[in-house]
Amino acid sequence: MERVLVLGISGAGKSTLARALGRELGLPYHELDALHFCGPQWRVSPTFAGDTARIVAGDRWVLDGQGPAAVRDLMWKRADTVVWLDLPRHVVMRRVLHRSLRRSLRHEQLFGGNREAWREWLRADHPVRWAWSRFAERRTEITQRAADPRFAPLRVVRLSSPREAALWLRGHTGTA
């Protein structure tokens, strides 16, 4: 594993797994949301596609996230491994609710200086609403991409529980 794409719906644990995998394998880790959002008000970086293309052109990296359609094929074509956190909806929803509540209550600063605000909970693109409404769609899309011959001989590792993900990570890095 030299070029790894970690996928899953919001709240699946992509960043946590990707960060740990990168650290343990000595691969540079890049958080796709941090590349995508460059400023307050969730402003999208005008250099996002180019920045992503430069990263994936490299020989070694870990990226977490599906990203906008403009970069998906490029990431899938360059990756040698996709790690898919395909966790049950109830697990994902518990995680994303907890994370968003914590971020809102503590006013945690995120990528681009953004924060999850209470008023944003009503927006369709809030992580909690996104995870609920896009769960099946994201699963279908990843399943189709994993079977797409354009991305062969890509290795796809599908992990269906937090325990399975922890065991897989331990088996590939020698840690928990």
Image: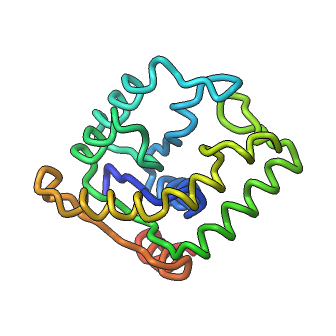
From the top left corner, tell me how far across and down residue 90 is, in percent. Answer: 61, 76
- Residue at 65% x, 35% y: name it: 111
Please tell me which residue lies in front, 153 or 20.
153
Indicate the quadrant containing the N terminus: top left, top right, bottom left or bottom right. Answer: bottom left
Please tell me which residue lies in front, 145 or 15.
145
From the top left corner, tell me how far across and down residue 40 is, in percent. Answer: 70, 24
Vertical order, 164 against 142 (above or below): below
Left or right relative to 113: residue 176: left
Q: Quadrant of residue 110?
A: top right
As drawn, the residue found furthest toward the right would be 105
- Residue at 38% x, 26% y: name it: 49
Please tell me which residue lies in front, 2 or 37.
37
From the top left corner, tell me how far across and down residue 56 is, in percent. Answer: 32, 37
Left or right relative to 164: residue 43: right
Please tell me which residue lies in front, 164 or 36.
36
Is residue 141 shown to the viewer in this render?
Answer: yes
- Residue at 29% x, 64% y: name it: 143
From the top left corner, tell me how far across and down residue 69 is, in percent. Answer: 35, 38
Left or right relative to 106: residue 32: left
Q: Quadrant of residue 83?
A: bottom left
